[in-house]
Image: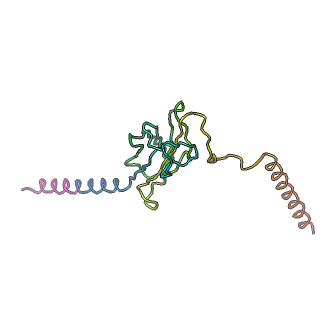
């Protein structure tokens, strides 16, 4: 065998080994996110292993996955057993949102959920479960992000008190600097 053919075979062999190694590393970099959707009969936001009759899996609920840079958006639906799963999810802090048909269901559990798919947290994220209640008049008990924690009067009193303390601090600092 001449030198050129031998060199070509060596380059081909090394290239193949290199590509296989890269494929293995990329496969290790991807993770998965899975969970389920269940019916919340009493609308309390809990529907997994509660012992409440009728809290069964819900098929056909849209689940949306959005990567932290919002460059990747994947939409799936829950299966006949209520489960869903995103395989080969890249490393990201994924926002997982249940988006049921608004004419049939309303989400009563926390929505969206966040799944950190990183080697430190584990690449396989499980248990991202949602509860949905039939109808559009379900009472959502769990707080929504950004909702006010108390009455508006308490918020105003707190704001005025806080601003007063800041003002007193500024006056005292000005007097200290003059002395």
Residue depicted at x 39% and y 43%: 81
**Residue situated furthest top in the rendering:** 103
The single residue placed furthest to the left in the displayed view is: 1
* Residue depicted at x 19% and y 53%: 12
Left or right relative to 85: residue 133: right
Q: Where is residue 63 in the image (x, y as percent from the top left)?
A: 46, 41
Range covered by the magenta-colored residues:
1-14
Q: Please state the horizontal and vertical placement of residue 139, each as a whole percent of the image.
A: 62, 40
Residue 26, position in %: x, y?
Answer: 35, 53
Q: Does the magenta stretch include residue 12?
A: yes
* Rendering coords of residue 53 (x, y %): 49, 45
- The foreground one among 176 and 146 is 146
In front of the other: 103 or 156: 103
Prevailing secondary structure of the magenta residues:
helix
Is 159 on the left or on the right of 54, as rendered? right
> Going by the picture, which residue comes out furthest to the front?
53
Rendered image quadrant of residue 21: bottom left
């Amino acid at each position: 065998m001449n030198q050129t053919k031998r060199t070509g075979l060596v380059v081909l062999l090394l290239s193949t080994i290199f590509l296989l190694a890269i494929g293995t590393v990329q496969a290790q970099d991807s993770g998965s996110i899975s969970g389920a959707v269940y019916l919340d009969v009493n609308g309390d936001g809990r529907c997994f292993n509660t012992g409440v009759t009728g809290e069964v899996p819900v098929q056909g609920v849209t689940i949306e996955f959005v990567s932290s840079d919002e460059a990747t958006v994947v939409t799936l639906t829950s299966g006949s057993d209520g489960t869903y799963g995103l395989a080969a999810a890249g490393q990201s802090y994924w926002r997982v949102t249940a988006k049921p048909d608004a004419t049939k269901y309303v989400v009563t559990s926390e929505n969206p959920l966040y799944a950190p798919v990183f080697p430190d947290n584990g690449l396989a994220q499980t248990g991202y479960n949602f509860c949905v209640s039939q109808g559009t008049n379900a009472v959502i008990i769990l707080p929504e992000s950004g909702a006010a924690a108390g009455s508006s009067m308490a918020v105003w009193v707190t704001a005025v008190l806080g601003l007063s303390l800041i003002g007193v601090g500024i006056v005292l600092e000005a007097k200290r600097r003059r002395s």
